[in-house]
Image: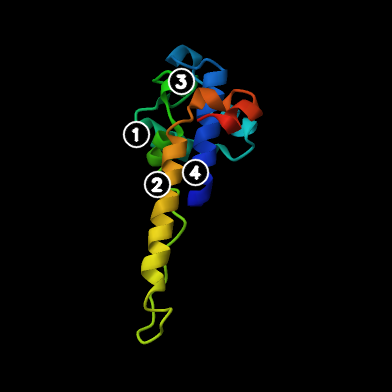
Amino acid sequence: MSDSQKFPVAAHALAYLAHKSADAPARAVSSAELAASMPTNPVVVRRVTAMLAKAGLIATRMGAGGGAWLTRDPKTITLDQVLRAVDGCTHLGVAPAGVKGCPVGERIPDAVSAAIRAADTAASERLSKITVLDLLAEPAKNASAA
């Protein structure tokens, strides 16, 4: 699974668990059910839920009657926490090395790196204001959440 898939799968899984009120082992949701709601492969879901469990956002149980459930209230889980849990980043890339002697090539790596850092910071700040519970709200409300 590519890094670009981890965050959307994780956010979807957490929102689905919140929607299903899966907040205890008795209400665990299977990886097959989570995968069907996306749709994606249950193996992808299990990889992401393992990362979410390691971060303490959910708990999981294997086997018959197993699945995942939230360990925290969805209104306290922010999307920047989700992004970090799946080792994701809002990182836009890395500036290429410059070429000595080129008036642009000597300056562009630092300039582009500064712009990328600023964008990363802005994205992280924005994600810190959106909770898993917000994802279940009306789309227009979610888009304007601040």
Distance from Cα at disc 4 to Cα at disc 2: 20 Å
> Which residue carries the number 1 mark?
54
Q: Amino acid at mark 3?
A: Lys
Q: Amino acid at mark 4?
A: Lys
Q: Amino acid at mark 1?
A: Lys
> Which residue carries the number 3 mark?
75
Q: Nearer the viewer, mark 3 or mark 2?
A: 2
Q: Earlier in the sequence, mark 4 or mark 3?
A: 4
Q: Earlier in the sequence, mark 2 or mark 1?
A: 1
Report the label total: 4
Q: Which mark, residue 6?
A: 4
Distance from Cα at disc 2 to Cα at disc 1: 24 Å
Q: Which mark, residue 121?
A: 2
Q: Are marks 4 and 1 in contact (CB under 8 Å)?
A: no
Q: Residue at x 39, y 62 (%)?
A: 113
Distance from Cα at disc 4 to Cα at disc 1: 14 Å
Q: Are marks 4 and 3 in contact (CB under 8 Å)?
A: no
Q: Earlier in the sequence, mark 3 or mark 1?
A: 1
Q: Quadrant location of residue 39? A: top right
**Which is more toward the observer, 56 or 75?**
75
Few, some or many residues within 10 Å of mark 3 (<14, 14–19, 20+)? few
Provide residue 129's location: percent of width, then percent of height: 45, 31
Q: Nearer the viewer, mark 3 or mark 1?
A: 3
Few, some or many residues within 10 Å of mark 2 (<14, 14–19, 20+)? some
Q: Amino acid at mark 2?
A: Thr
Few, some or many residues within 10 Å of mark 4 (<14, 14–19, 20+)? many
Q: Earlier in the sequence, mark 4 or mark 2?
A: 4
Distance from Cα at disc 4 to Cα at disc 3: 21 Å
